[in-house]
Image (spheres, rainbow, N blue to C red):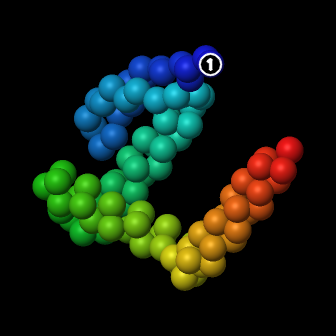
Amino acid sequence: MDRPTNHLIQVEIYGQSYNLRGEGDTSYLQELAGYVDRRMREVSEATATVDSLKVAILAALNIADEGRRERPDAASRLPAANERIARMIDRLDRGLAEA
């Protein structure tokens, strides 16, 4: 089985260079880094905070909030999804046992 290829790319986030390693298309990592950079700059401008650690934490909180707001009911659907998956696995097991 072929292993996915790891790529090493350099990105800049909030004036700092980072070497990132990831699988697949490097443009995705560049896009993520660009998004984090934009959010950090927005936080910095809105709060007039110069401490990069505080800016990073506030940006992370904003990004986490965005993610939670986009899928507010995902956690509540997890038990039902797990139950459906368990039923499907059981059906597959029975089907394979019969074959």
Measuring from the top left, give residue 77's x and y in whole percent: 60, 78
Figure check: 1 above or below 86: above
Figure check: 85 above or below 9: below
Of all residues, the one furthest to the left in this rendering is 51
Figure check: 26 above or below 95: above
Q: Nearer the viewer, residue 2 or 4?
A: 2
| Quarter residue 40 falls in | bottom left
Left or right: residue 77 versus residue 22 is right
Quadrant of the frame with the C terminus? top right
Q: Element at badge 1?
A: loop
User: What residue did someone put label 1 on?
Assistant: 1
- Residue drawn at the location 77% of the way across and 57% of the way down: 94
Of all residues, the one furthest to the right in this rendering is 99
- Kind of residue at disc 1: Met
Measuring from the top left, give residue 82's x and y in whole percent: 60, 69
- Residue drawn at the location 51% of the way across and 76% of the way down: 75
Quadrant of the frame with the N terminus? top right
| Quarter residue 9 falls in | top left
